[in-house]
Amino acid sequence: MNSWLCAIDHKRIGILYMLSALLFMLAGGLEAMVMRVQLAAPNLKLIGPETYDQIFTMHGTTMIFLVAMPVLTGFGVYLTPLMIGANEMALPRLGAISFWLQFFGGVLLYFSFATGNAPAAGWFSYAPLSEKAFSPGPGLDYWALALLMIAGSSIGSAINLIVTIATERAPGMTMRLVPMFAWMTLVTSIMIVFALPALVASLVMLLSDRLLHARFFDAAQGGAPLLWQHYFWIFGHPEVYILVLPAFGMISEIIPVFSRKPIFGYPFVATSTVAIAFLSYGVWVHHMFAVALGRNFLAVFAAASMLIAVPTGMKIFSWIATMWGGSIRFTTAMLFAIAFLLEFTVGGLSGVAFATVPVDWQVTDTYFVVAHIHYVLVGGTVFALLAGVHYWFPKFSGHLLDEKLGRWSFWLIVLGFNTTFFVQHFLGLLGMRRRVYTYPDIPWFGALNLISTIGAGILVFGIFIFLCNIGMSLLFGAKAEEDPWNAWTLEWAATSPPALKNFAQPPEVRSRRPLWDRKHPEAPDWLALGRDA
Amino acid sequence: MNDRRNQLGMALFLIAEAVFFLLLILAFIYFRGPAPQGLGLPISFLYTGLLLASTFSMWRAAARGAAWKLWVAITIGLGAVFLLGQGSGYVRLFLDGVAIRQSLFDTTFFTLAGVHALHVLVGLIALAIIPITAIRTMALYWYFFACLWLVIVLVAYAGSVV
């Protein structure tokens, strides 16, 4: 027990991040199910509007700040040193404090339920609703303080990852040979360093308003509620890519291994990531199209937003081209990776629709938004994470997952997810508002919402099977060899699970597939493909 | 090698701080409220000068010569004078009824000054306890917040004159 509480080893901290995310995922999932049950039929009043507001606020805040970010950080912290052939993070104690700040931030946020007044202003807590005059209870203070801790934690872990990748790479591993997941982790971490301070600034201003009666967002006193929207989304839009780029990194590791081909267009996948990172700072206003900001202003941000589809599309084509002509092995990990391509593309397409200002005006604040964000963050991030868990679990635990249960969970999750969220596109187009606790009996509303609720039940069942698979594997699963997938990156050169010191000798790196070179001394990549391979 | 890791980490942290303060400064410029009477900018310039002077003693300490402890002590002394001097000025204003809730200038300026002072305070505590191996990393922190204060004073002064 003590060895976990005081852990500074990157593998233990990575596991702690994942367990903490799992704990909060159960809470956030429960909140989601409460909402879906409440919305199952028109005019239901199982919970009141005040409770519903708290539940959807906590669901969004939990899933983004207590689940998605920490689990991705967990993968980054666990895998990055292994992938670059290092034995440890560059700043191990910073890693430990980052985790515990994150965890206790989550605990603090959930403590707000004990006051009977959880935050209820949505996950982006727009001013003036989040001001003392309209949210007098302590909920928003808990929200802001918890997010301050979590933002500090994210900045700390991001700095740690950047320094690690910059200084700890194995001899011979130039930046052109770094595995794609580590590349994406690097870009994500740089984005965190530039974006999270905007959240911190917003929260400091909000807390000054709430606790010291400052006037930042108080329009009656000359303040500007719009300033909150600008600052929050200057953080908030890069945040979307902070949540999805590591997922891209996982996909970029998994698809090549199960297609038995190196990734197609490595330089393009890496540089398009950098392009996405740059562009993501110039598009925040597309969250604010419904604010009257002036036509030219909107046009610029609409164009910039559509531009992001270009580097993102390049990646999708790179992954498809990697599979093309490959000898594909349909493991559960690969199935989730392929499903990711489809689901994320749906979310990307509705995103391009949103970048068109008149479309945005038509469907803003409706269930179309809910459908879009869930296709991006569940269809994108969560599907990639599930692929990643199935791929790396043998490395984490030393046990193989059961492929049969894996398939069951895969199909249930695909079915449940699409049933839940696809119909919400139609609900949005029909005009159903989001964040309202119930709805009148309008044609189609009841039927589509019932379908969505049934889908959510299937999704939960699929997740349950997935968790059972993990539990069974830990108890009775077959032992995993160090390299069960015949993969190419250095984490598979360590034992499963890796020893405290990852590598007995520093690994030799001369190409992007150091393990291939070791297994095929007769035809190593660096000989066949030259320096850049 | 350790020095390189720590300094890179600190540099990245300061980039994050720069973004944070940039946004607070932008909020200050955006609102451009009229400054209250008696903000005492001339005396502020004196304290600002002392804080800037402390970067010299910090630089001498970071050279890690025999007298490094003396230079650290001088840095701490100058930083403390800066904090106490600025603080007493703000307390006097507060007693005269100038508070963060009073006007947009007060909201934006005192949030900025308060958050900056908090960083200087943390820097003073850190300087008092760190070993010689961490002095170069800490020096980066100190240079950054000394120069940042110059920027804040210039912006505030320009804002209240124009």
Image: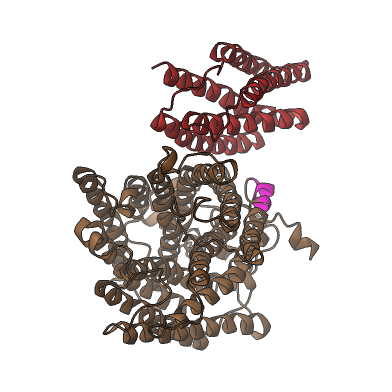
Chain colours: A brown, B red
Residue pushed farthest right? Answer: A2
- The secondary structure that most of the magenta stretch takes on is helix
Q: Position of residue A342 (x, y in %)?
A: 32, 73
- Expressed as whole percent of the image width and height from the top left, the position of residue A79 reads 56, 60
Q: Residue at x 61, y 77 (%)?
A: A480
Residue segment shown in magenta: A91-97
Residue A162 is situated, as x and y percent measured from the top left of the image, at: 53, 45
Quarter of the picture holding the N terminus of chain A: bottom right
Number of marks: 0
User: Visible in this render: residue A252?
Assistant: yes
Q: In the rendered view, tell whether residue B147 sits above or below residue A175.
A: above
Of residues B42 and A474, the one nearer the viewer is B42
The answer to which of B42 and A325 lies nearer the viewer is B42
Q: Where does residue A240 sit, x and y in percent of width and height?
A: 41, 57
Picture quadrant where residue B144 is located? top right
The answer to whether residue B138 is left or right of residue A360 is right
Residue pictured at 30% horizontal, 68% vertical = A345
- A526 relative to B126, above or below: below
In terms of depth relative to the viewer, which is nearer, A8 or B24? B24
Asked whether residue A332 is drawn in magenta, I would say no
- Is residue A220 positioned above or below A490 on the image? above
Q: Tell me if I can see residue A178 in this picture.
A: no
Return the residue nearer the eye: A108 or A138.
A138
